[in-house]
Image (cartoon, rainbow, N blue to C red):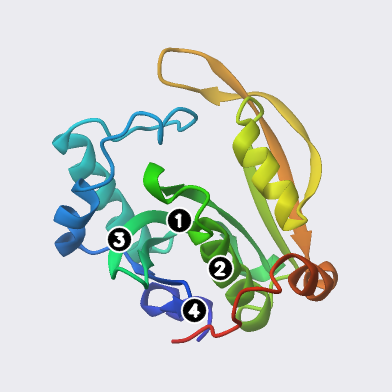
């Protein structure tokens, strides 16, 4: 699988499977998306059925046009969709991308699902796409996400002030993190030892 095949890629390990978002996923997403806690630090929110329709349309369009590659996160124990994540800011020539737009159902927080999804995405980015850099960003106020990124071993690079608008008009500052190719083998061994390495297609 290459950069050109990203829309068709399926990633998996012992805990999760990630594959592109489909129109037929609507009912599955509807089970878990209407929780305001999920969207506290998101630029866009899913609060109504119309919002969910826009999310699905945008995810599918972005994936098919190569703007982002938006995945549904499936918990392999239950077979249910429990969240979403994406590759974005795709820069093939520079072997760089961002992992973001990530969320999981509130009931799945602290279960290891989000960590397993990050592992699948990082493995594919470094092992298959041969990325030199994978980056992440989050709201400086999102202490849970910042703690999670630090737990992955991502390096905090700095704050970009007044980055964009949030719902309600607040201008948010974002903090960037990254993992580099030469850092990944040691981080994978140290931070993800309990999870399997099976990245499937």
Secondary structure beneath label 1: strand
Give left or right: position of 100 versus 40. right
Placement of 7 over or under 65, stated as above or below: below
Crowd band around label 4 with a 10 angstrom C-alpha radius: few (<14), some (14–19), many (20+): some
* Nearer the camera: disc 1 or disc 3: 3
N-terminal-most mark, 2 or 4: 4
Kindly check if marks 1 and 2 are in contact, taking CB atoms under 8 A apart as contact: yes
Mark linked to residue 197: none
Q: Residue at x 52, y 14 (%)?
A: 170
N-terminal-most mark, 1 or 2: 1
- Quarter-of-image position of residue 189: bottom right
Q: Position of residue 14 (x, y in %)?
A: 49, 79
Crowd band around label 3 with a 10 angstrom C-alpha radius: few (<14), some (14–19), many (20+): many
Mark 1–mark 3 distance (CA, rounded to whole Å): 12 Å
Q: Which residue is mark 1?
A: 85
Secondary structure beneath label 3: strand
* Nearer the camera: disc 2 or disc 4: 4
- Quarter-of-image position of residue 8: bottom left
Kindly check if marks 2 and 3 are in contact, taking CB atoms under 8 A apart as contact: no
Mark 1–mark 4 distance (CA, rounded to whole Å): 18 Å
Mark 1–mark 2 distance (CA, rounded to whole Å): 9 Å
Placement of 45 over or under 148, stated as above or below: above
Q: Which residue is mark 3?
A: 81
Q: Which residue is mark 2?
A: 121
Mark linked to residue 14: 4
């Amino acid at each position: 699988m290459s950069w050109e095949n990203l829309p068709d890629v399926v990633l998996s390990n012992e805990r999760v499977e990630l594959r592109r978002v489909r129109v037929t996923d609507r009912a599955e997403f509807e089970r878990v998306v209407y929780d305001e806690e999920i969207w506290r630090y998101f630029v866009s929110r899913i609060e109504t059925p119309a919002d969910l329709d826009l999310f699905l349309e945008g995810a599918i369009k972005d994936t098919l046009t190569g703007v982002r590659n938006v995945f549904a996160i499936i918990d392999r124990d239950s077979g249910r969709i429990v969240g979403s994540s994406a590759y974005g800011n795709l820069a093939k020539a520079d072997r760089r991308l961002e992992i973001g737009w990530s969320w999981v159902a509130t009931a799945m927080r602290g279960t290891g699902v989000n960590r397993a999804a990050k592992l699948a995405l990082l493995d594919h980015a470094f092992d298959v796409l041969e990325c030199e850099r994978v980056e992440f960003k989050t709201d400086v106020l999102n202490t849970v996400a910042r703690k999670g990124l630090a737990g992955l071993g991502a390096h905090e690079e700095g704050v970009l002030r007044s980055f964009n608008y949030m719902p309600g008009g607040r201008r948010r500052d974002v903090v960037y993190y990254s993992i580099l190719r030469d850092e990944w083998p040691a981080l994978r061994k140290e931070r993800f030892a309990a999870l399997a390495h099976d990245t499937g297609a």
